Amino acid sequence: MAKTKSDLPTKICPVCNRPFSWRKKWADCWDEVKYCSERCRRHRSKIDKQTKA
């Protein structure tokens, strides 16, 4: 029986603060995934500077 989307693990993106779900392409590296998208990954330095100030 296939899993429904609600059964998949989720995380909160530290850049946009939105939840994102597990994807098959992240199957081998889910523990290392921090950002929901490439766009958020690129903007992480701006967020880091805001939290340090």
Image: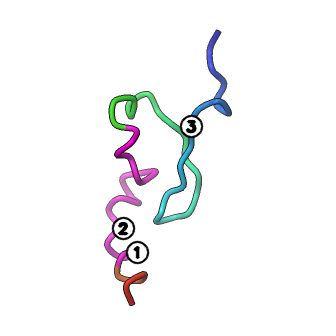
Identity, as a three-letter code, of the amino acid under mark 3: Pro
Which amino acid lies under the numbered mark 1 shown in the image of this protein?
Ile
Q: Residue at x 56, y 43 (%)?
A: 10
**Label 3: how many residues lie within 10 Å, few (<14), some (14-19) or many (20+)?**
few
Residue at which label 1 appears: 47
Q: Residue drawn at (68%, 33%), measured in percent from left and top? A: 6
Q: Which residues are magenta?
A: 30-48
As helix, strand or loop, the secondary structure at mark 1 comes to: helix
Q: Residue furthest top?
A: 1
On whether residue 23 falls in the magenta region, the answer is no
Residue 35, how many percent across, how many down? 42, 54
* Mark 1, other Cα within 10 Å: few <14 / some 14–19 / many ≥20: few
Say whether marks 2 and 1 touch (CB < 8 Å).
Answer: yes
Tell me: 5 left or right of 11: right
The Cα–Cα distance between marks 3 and 2, rounded to whole angstroms, is 24 Å
Q: CA distance from mark 2 to mark 1?
A: 7 Å
Q: Residue type at mark 2?
A: His
* Residue 18 image-quadrant placement: bottom right
Dot 3: what SS?
loop
Viewport quadrant of the C terminus? bottom left
Q: Position of residue 50 (x, y in %)?
A: 41, 83
